[in-house]
Structures are given as C-alpha cells and as structure tokens.
Amino acid sequence: MKKKVEEIRFSAKPQAAFSEVKHRLPMLSLENGYHVQDVTDFDERTKKFLRDDTSIDYTVEPEIDGLAVELVYEKGALSVASTRGDGLVGKNVTPNIRTILSVPLTLIEPADGKPIPGLLEVRGEVYMETDAFETLNRDRIERGFPPFKNPRTAAADSLRQLDPRITAKRPLNMFCFGIGEMSGPKFSTQQELMIALQQWGFRVNRPYIRVCSTISEVIDYFHHLEETRDQLPFEIDGAVVKVNQLDLQAKLGQKSSSPRWTFALKFKKTEEEIP
Ligand code: IVH
C-alpha cells in the first residue's frame, strides 16, 4: 500500500529548472499593521467604503509563517501548483507540492455538500510545524549540514528543490485559506467556503478560525492568539481579519496591490526576531 502512495505522489525525476506559471487572478498582498488602532481604522474604513449600515462579520485566523502557494484543480484533480512569485507569475512547483501529504491529489465529492467545481484554484500557506522543524535541524547538524534559521526558511528551501525526492523527505504541511478562480458552486460567506474546502479534502485551520461580529471581538481574539502563540504547533506572526460576507468582499474590491476586505494585524517583533 505504501509503495502505491509513493508511486502516485512522487514523480522521482529531478527537474532542470522551474517553469513559470501565470496566475489567472493576481495573488495580492495583505495590508498590515502592528497596532490595535490599525485594525480599528481598517474597520472604520471598511464601513465608510460600504456607505451603509450593513453589519459586517469578520473571520479572524492565525497568520501562518510560511510561503503562499496556489493549487489548481481541474475536474477535481490537482493539475498545477505554483509559488506566489511576484503575485502575477510564480514558479511551477507541482512535483514538490505533490509530496505534501496534506495536499489532496484528487478531491472528495461530499454526500451532503457542494459539488466539486470544474475549475478550482485554492490558495494557502506551506509551512513546517515547530517540532518537525527542530527534528529536521537536529538531523542536519548530526549529518554536518547547517541548520535552518527558522521554520519558514526551512519550508522555503524545501519547496525550491529541483529534486522532489529531497522535498519528500522534508516535513512540509499546508493550510488553505482562500481561493482564486472557481467555477460552479456559490457561497455566501468566507466561513462557508472554508467548510466546503475542508469537505473537498483540503486542510483548513478550522479550530482557530473565529467569526466575530464586532471589532472589539476581533481585538480580543487577536490578544488571545498573541498570548497563546507559544502553545501552537506552528509559528504565527499575527492574525488575518477578513470580511466574512462574500458579497461585501466583492463590493469592497481591491486597491492596486491588496484587497480592501482583509487586514493582517501583526504581533510586535520580539528582540530575537529583529534582524
Ligand atoms: S489571506 C490577499 N490568510 O500572509 C492575500 N494569508 O503577510 C490574502 N498568510 O500573502 C491572504 N496565513 O501568504 C491569508 N490565514 C491566512 C494567512 C495568510 C498566512 C500569508 C499569505 C500572505 C501573507 C501576507
């Protein structure tokens, strides 16, 4: 059985170079700030832009410290996986992404959920859990290789290997947090979309995604994440706040490089993190 899984997941042959992939929709960046006032300002800006008294819910979730990737599924099968690159064009890392066991190669049709879209672009963060990172570093030191500085640099090094057999030996993981293009099913909220992604087989950070109906709830959850971040199995650098209602996300649209419906409130850097 093990052999069969490996045959499906690992293409085994090293690539000569990474080809380029143009994202159908740009992978934008995330506006951010380090002060609670910044997220309060974001809330006020958002309400002012919508110019009515629609009540807004926000989803709040940890900002995982890893690398953004996009996975393209056609008729439920993974066809291409790419890095964010400059947001317009990324590198084709499909053979490497296929080695990550939490990335589904084919999607599951739920018995009581939305059907699998013909085209689905899923975005998320590839990262390394802290324990796995420490084990990897201990092993590297024993074998005379330099240790990685942190889980993010270890994940980045693992993803940029031309030989997927090397990537397969690295303990990479992935959380999905959004979509690019999608044909077919319609959703009303970010939360519903996350539930559908999970039903289709993606790994979603559900236990840590909160829906908040006021900005003070958002701020409370941000503080909770900040206080408990050391107990999490992965490194996080803040909280990502997203307007939950997808019709409001669409009305808000985007500025030149970032959507207006999301904001990352970052933890202040500790002394060791300041370069
Ligand atoms: S949503 C417009 N959700 O953080 C981009 N991003 O600092 C929407 N990230 O480029 C991204 N965890 O790579 C989102 N839960 C999360 C995230 C997350 C980590 C990354 C993502 C983004 C970067 C910005």
Image (tube, grey):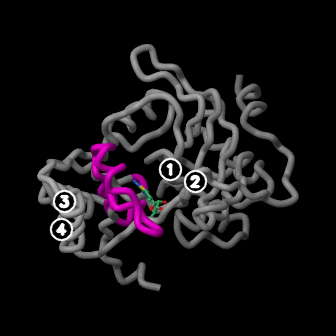
Which residue lies most toward the front here?
A: 51
Range of the magenta residues?
Answer: 233-262
Type of the residue with mark 1: Gly
Please say if the residues under marks 4 and 2 sit with CB atoms less than 8 Å apart: no
Circle 1 crowding by C-alpha within 10 Å: few under 14, some 14–19, many from 20: many
Q: Nearer the viewer, residue 271 or 261?
A: 261
Identify residue for label 2: 69
User: What is the distance, in whole Å, between disc 4 and disc 2 at their CAs?
Assistant: 29 Å
User: What is the distance, in whole Å, between disc 4 and disc 1 at their CAs?
Assistant: 26 Å
For the residue labelled by badge 2, is the local secondary structure a helix, a strand or a loop?
A: strand
Indicate which disc, 4 or 3, sits on the residue closer to the N terminus.
4
Q: Is mark 1 within 8 Å of ligand 1?
A: yes
For the residue labelled by badge 4, is the local secondary structure a helix, a strand or a loop?
A: helix
Q: Is mark 4 within 8 Å of ligand 1?
A: no
Indicate which disc, 4 or 1, sits on the residue closer to the N terminus.
4
Asked where in the image residue 75 lies, by quadrant, the reply is top right
Going 29% across and 57% down the picture, which residue do you hit? Answer: 241
Judged left or right of residue 239, residue 28 is: right
User: What is the distance, in whole Å, between disc 2 and disc 1 at their CAs?
Assistant: 6 Å
Type of the residue with mark 4: Thr
Indicate which disc, 2 or 1, sits on the residue closer to the N terminus.
2
Q: Position of residue 274 (x, y in %)?
A: 42, 84
Going 52% across and 68% down the picture, which residue do you hit? Answer: 150
Indicate which disc, 3 or 1, sits on the residue closer to the N terminus.
3
Going 30% across and 67% down the picture, which residue do you hit? Answer: 265
Type of the residue with mark 2: Val
Identify residue for label 1: 124
Please say if the residues under marks 2 and 1 sit with CB atoms less than 8 Å apart: yes
Identify residue for label 3: 47
Q: Position of residue 221 (x, y in %)?
A: 20, 56
- In this view, the mark in front (3 or 2): 3
Type of the residue with mark 3: Lys
